[in-house]
Image (tube, rainbow, N blue to C red):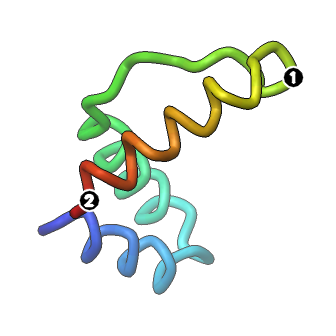
């Protein structure tokens, strides 16, 4: 099941605590990016813009 399908499954089963918990755990375990950015209030505007631009370029 792809991440997109898993998110859809989460949406469809949000009222079933057991199914939702299992699916959410699976989705969170797939998360590969472990780098955490500091809060935006602690960053310069240029740094934030550079992060967004890099993410946009990855999608293209």
Residue found at x 16% / y 67% = 2
| Up/down of 35 relative to 40, above or below | above
Question: Left of 14 or right of it: where is 21?
Answer: left
Among the 4 quarters of the image, the one containing residue 39: top right
Q: Foreground residue, 14 or 57?
A: 57
| Residue closest to the far right | 41
Residue 7 location in percent, x, y? 39, 70
Among the 4 quarters of the image, the one containing residue 30: top left
Count of all numbered marks drawn on residues in the image: 2
Residue 44 location in percent, x, y? 76, 20
Residue found at x 32% / y 28% = 33
Question: Left of 38 or right of it: where is 35?
Answer: left
Q: Quadrant of the C terminus?
A: bottom left
| Residue closest to the far left | 1
User: Can you identify the residue that label 2 sits on?
Assistant: 59
CA–CA distance in space, label 2 to label 1 = 26 Å
* Residue neighbourhood size for the residue with mark 1, other residues' Cα within 10 Å, grouped as few (<14), some (14–19), many (≥20): few
| Residue closest to the far bottom | 12
Q: Secondary structure at mark 1?
A: helix
Residue found at x 25% / y 76% = 5
User: Can you identify the residue that label 1 sits on?
Assistant: 41
Question: Left of 23 or right of it: where is 46?
Answer: right
* Residue neighbourhood size for the residue with mark 2, other residues' Cα within 10 Å, grouped as few (<14), some (14–19), many (≥20): few
| Up/down of 47 relative to 29, above or below | above
Q: Earlier in the sequence, mark 2 or mark 1?
A: 1
Q: Foreground residue, 5 or 60?
A: 60
Q: Secondary structure at mark 2?
A: helix
Q: Foreground residue, 10 or 4?
A: 4
Q: Quadrant of the N terminus?
A: bottom left
């Amino acid at each position: 099941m792809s991440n997109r399908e898993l998110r859809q499954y989460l949406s469809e089963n949000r009222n079933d605590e057991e199914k939702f918990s299992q699916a959410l755990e699976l989705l969170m375990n797939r998360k590969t990016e472990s780098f955490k950015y500091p809060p935006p209030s602690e960053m310069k505007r240029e740094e934030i813009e550079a992060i967004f631009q890099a993410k946009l370029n990855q999608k293209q």
